[in-house]
Image (spheres, rainbow, N blue to C red):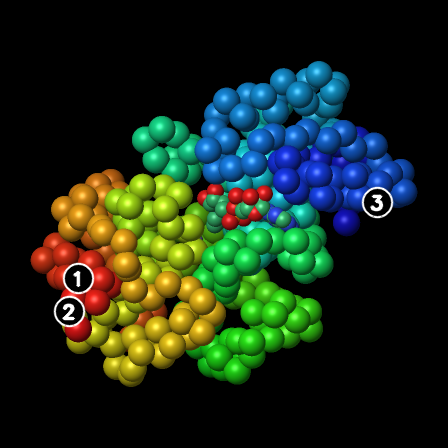
Amino acid sequence: MSFPSRRGAIVTNTTVGSLYAERVAQAFANKGFTLSVIVIPDGEEYKTLSTVEYIYHELLRLNLDRKSFLLALGGGVITDITGFVASTFLRGIDYYQIPTSLLAQVDSSIGGKTGVNLEEGKNLVGTFYQPKGVWIDLSFLSTLPEREYREGLSEVLKAAFLEGGDFLALVEREKEVIMARDSLILEETVVRAVDFKRKIVEEDEREHGRRSILNYGHTIGHALEKALGYGVLRHGEAVALGMIGEAFLARTMGIETKRVLETQKAILDSFGLPTSLSLFCDHSTFCSALLKDKKKEAGKVRFVLLKDFGQPCVGIEVEEEKITEVISFLQGGKQ
Ligand SMILES: NC(=O)c1ccc[n+]([C@@H]2O[C@H](COP(=O)([O-])OP(=O)(O)OC[C@H]3O[C@@H](n4cnc5c(N)ncnc54)[C@H](O)[C@@H]3O)[C@@H](O)[C@H]2O)c1
Ligand SMILES: [Zn+2]
């Protein structure tokens, strides 16, 4: 791996920083690098422009210049915000990532999307900016809390449903071992999920076409997150419910050709992810969250739906009436 110079800064948060920053800085020091550590508070609510500004000021205080580099050490919040800072500080400096959550390892560290949230919504400001390198080390996962581990698995399962074949067979067969974070099988699973996303992003970096299949489960998932209030469901939990809701749509619209809905439900259940909604969710709040979110793109709500595992169809328009049935279905009211 090449570096622009021997000087840079690790950007991390209080939780991950206290566990790993010293160790990572020391490993780099042993190779002749001098890395300062910039620590921000832990939480999605700090993925903001004011945190970005704080980091800019720290970089200047540390006398970092255009040849310096950043190293993101943390989950998706840290990799997104560090990428954004790197793409804009002094018109762009190199950055590298050490993703420490499963979600960041299989999802946010691949594809070069950086960003921060605004009051009006998540990820509304950002850039496409590829890191110069990403190190994925599964030993970091030993300290990841269970709920965060499971939500990362939700994105892994999404990739397996979209790819089908051997990858789907692997997650079905090895669920206990994967849940137990067994390293060899987990390594194979993570590699497959990373390769799946990497290949798609290489074909369509700017999301003009094929990359949109990665939104499977996310159209309904995002609307649920928003309608219930951010933080009630973790993102991966909302995506699990979103995949169930979208499989229900594929069935009721006659797109599904095999029993995707039942198989998906069994797999998600076995990984401890939610497949039904016990919380109250107001239909009209849900629909307006969904319509508002997507109208900006195309004027209509379009979905990625599965004909079968490994066979996603993109750009499927769904009428509002059908969408309202999803909530009843998720709440167990209607089959
Ligand atoms: N850029 C992209 O393409 C992309 C894709 C998906 C998600 N994202 C973004 O990623 C973010 C979500 O990522 P996330 O789920 O990693 O959230 P996160 O960064 O908030 O991490 C989740 C929690 O786990 C902690 N944590 C991380 N690694 C740990 C470890 N090894 N040991 C102990 N605790 C650890 C964090 O401190 C945090 O409390 C969102 O902001 C989302 O928008 C971006
Ligand atoms: Zn996601």
**Callout 2: 10 Å neighbours few (<14), some, many (20+)?**
few
| Residue where numbered disc 3 is placed | 27
User: Residue visible at 31% across and 71% down?
Assistant: 306
- Is residue 152 visible from the viewing direction of this image? no
User: Residue visible at 77% across and 49% down?
Assistant: 1
- Proximity of marks 3 and 1: CB atoms separated by less than 8 Å: no
Q: x and y percent of residue 92 in the render?
A: 61, 30
**Callout 1: 10 Å neighbours few (<14), some, many (20+)?**
some
Q: x and y percent of residue 67 in the render?
A: 74, 29
Residue sitting farthest toward the left = 321
Q: Is mark 2 within 8 Å of ligand 2?
A: no
Q: Is residue 3 rendered to the left or right of residue 76?
A: right
* Secondary structure state at the residue bearing disc 1: helix
Nearest the eye: 87 or 287: 287
Quadrant assignment for the C terminus: bottom left
| Residue where numbered disc 2 is placed | 334
N-terminal of the two: label 3 or label 2?
A: 3
Q: Amino acid at mark 3?
A: Ala
Quarter of the view holding residue 21: top right
User: Residue visible at 50% across and 31% down?
Assistant: 46
Q: x and y percent of residue 178 in the render?
A: 58, 71
User: Disc 3 or disc 2, which is closer to the eye?
Assistant: 2
